[in-house]
Image: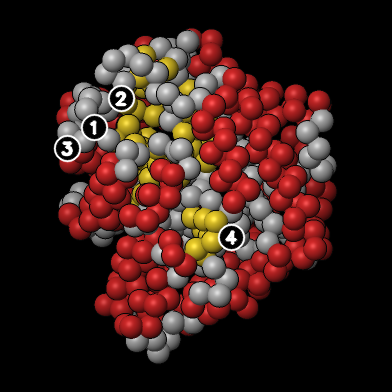
Amino acid sequence: MAYLKVSGTKIVDQNNKEVILRGAGLGGWLNMENFISGYPGCEFQIRAALAEVVGKDKSEFFFDKFLEYFFQDADAAFFKSLGLNCIRIPFNYRHFEDDMNPRVLKPEGFKHLDRVITLCANHGIYTILDLHTAPGGQNTDWHADAGTHIANFWNHKDFQDRTVWLWEELAKHYVGNTWIAGYNPLNEPTDPYHTRVIDFYDRVYSTIRKVDPHHALFLDGNTFASDFSHFGDAHKRWENCAYSIHDYSVYGFPAAPEPYVSGEDQRRRMRRSYERKREWMDARGLCVWNGEWGPVYARREYDGQRTEAINEERYRVLRDQLDIYNKDRLSWSIWTYKDIGYQGMVYVNRETPYMTLFRDFLAQKQRLAIDAWGADDSQVRHIYQPLIDLITKEVPSEYQNLYPFPVWKLESRVGRLARNILVSEFFVKPWAEHFRGKSVEELDVIARSFSFENCLHRDGLNKILTDNASLVAE
C-alpha cells in the first residue's frame, strides 16, 4: 500500500485514483473537551483537580482507562460498517511534552495514539493526525486547553519552536505508516495579525518535509479554519497540501436565527457561507478538506417533548450540507464520533455509572450554560445581559467587535469570558469531588461507561452519513 497524496483539487491513491475521505473526528479523546465528556473548564484543570482528590496514581489510572475504553476494536468495526473510511484524531501536546520539561519527548504519549491508528488500519480506515492543542494555546477557545481567551501561541516564539519540535518527532515516528492520510499541524488557529500563521506553516512544513516527504499536510485557515484571505501565494511553497475549512452552519445550533425548514433562502445562505470559506482555494485550483462540521442535538432530559422535532430539524441541516458536499465531491470529517449525548454518532448510555454519578451535575452545567459549545443560555441570559448592555453603552461601536470577530460577536465574547472561563472554574473541584473515596475498581467501572458496549447509537445521524457516503464511495 502507498501513501495518499494531494493532486490538484483531489486526494488520490498510488494509481492516481480519487479517494474521497468520509469520516469523523475522534473528539474528546486525546484532547478532552468539556461538552463531550461532561467536565467543566479545560482538560488541564480537571486533571489537576482529580489528582488532588484521589491522588496522582489513581488519577492517572482513571484517565488511562478512559482513553482505553473510549475507542477500541468494536468502535473501529462499527465505524467501518457505516461506509466511512477516515478518522481525524485530535490530540493534546501534553501527551508528548510537559510544560515544566519542554522538548523532552514522553514516549508513553504514543501508547494510545499508536493503538488506535493500528485498530483503524486493521479495519481499512485512514487516520489524520490533528494537533488540537499547542503550547500556549493557538486559539482563543477552551479546546486549546490554555484556560484563557488569549492565544499566546502567537505571542511567544518558544511556544512555536516547541510545536515545530514536536511535529519533527511525530513525523519521525509515523513517516512509514501509509494508513495515515496526513498531518493536520494546527487546529483552528486565531492569529489576530493573520501573518504569523503563514510564517508558522512555512516553518512546520519545512521541518516535517526534511523528515517525511510523503504524507499530505492539511492546513487550517485562520480564525477557526474559516479565513484564507491573507494566504496570498503561500501555496506555491507547499507541495502535497490540502486546505482545511470547518463548516459549521448556524442553523445547526440552539442560537439559530430561525427554525430550519430547508427553504430556498436558507439553503442559499448555507451554501454561501461554505463557498466563502473555500474561495481562496477555488481561485487557485487547490484541494479542500472539511475537517469539522455538523449540528448538535436536543436531549430529552433537557428539551423534553421538543426533542424529536428539534432533532428532525437538525437532520435537515445535515442532509442539506451533505448535498452541497456531494456535488463538490468534498472530503469531510464530521464532529464528533462519541460523546455524552450532544453531538456524537454514538453516546454514553444515561444509565451507566458515569452518567448516573454526574446526572445532577450535568443538569446544573446545562442550566448555567458553562460550556461554550452550542450553549442554550436562556436560563441565565438575564444575568449577563446587563454586562452586554453596559459594554454596548459605554464602548464606541467601532471598538465593540474585537478579534476573533465575526466568529465571536460581543455577546459571544461575554459568554466565553464570564460563563465559560470564570464561572466554569468554580465547578472544576466539585466535578472532581464526585470521585472522592472511589477505589481503583470503581474508577475502572466509571471509565468503562465510555466503552462501545455501553453506548447508544444516534441512528438518524448514522443512516444519513451512510447513505451519503455511498453516493461518493470510490
Amino acid type, residue under disc 3 in the picture = Lys
**Mark earlier in primary sequence (2, 4):** 2
**Mark earlier in primary sequence (2, 1):** 2
Q: Secondary structure at mark 3?
A: helix
What residue is disc 3 on?
A: 172
> Do the residues under discs 2 and 1 have CB atoms within 8 angstroms?
yes
What residue is disc 4 on?
A: 341
Where, quadrant-wise, is the C terminus in this rendering? top left
**With respect to residue 386, does 151 lie above or below?**
above
Residue 381: % across, % down: 78, 61
What residue is disc 1 on?
A: 178
Amino acid type, residue under disc 4 in the picture = Gly
**Marks 3/1: CA distance?**
13 Å
Residue sitting at x 60%, y 46%? 461
User: Relative to residue 460, is residue 54 drawn left or right?
Assistant: left
What residue is disc 2 on?
A: 4
Whether residue 148 can be seen here: no
**Mark earlier in primary sequence (2, 3):** 2
**Mark earlier in primary sequence (3, 1):** 3
Q: Nearer the viewer, mark 3 or mark 1?
A: 1
Residue 469: % across, % down: 51, 32
Residue 282: % across, % down: 53, 13
**Mark earlier in primary sequence (1, 4):** 1
Amino acid type, residue under disc 2 in the picture = Leu
**Marks 4/3: CA distance?**
37 Å
Nearest to the observer: residue 138 or residue 257: 257
Whether residue 428 can be seen here: yes
> Do the residues under discs 2 and 3 have CB atoms within 8 angstroms?
no
**Marks 2/3: CA distance?**
18 Å
Amino acid type, residue under disc 1 in the picture = Thr
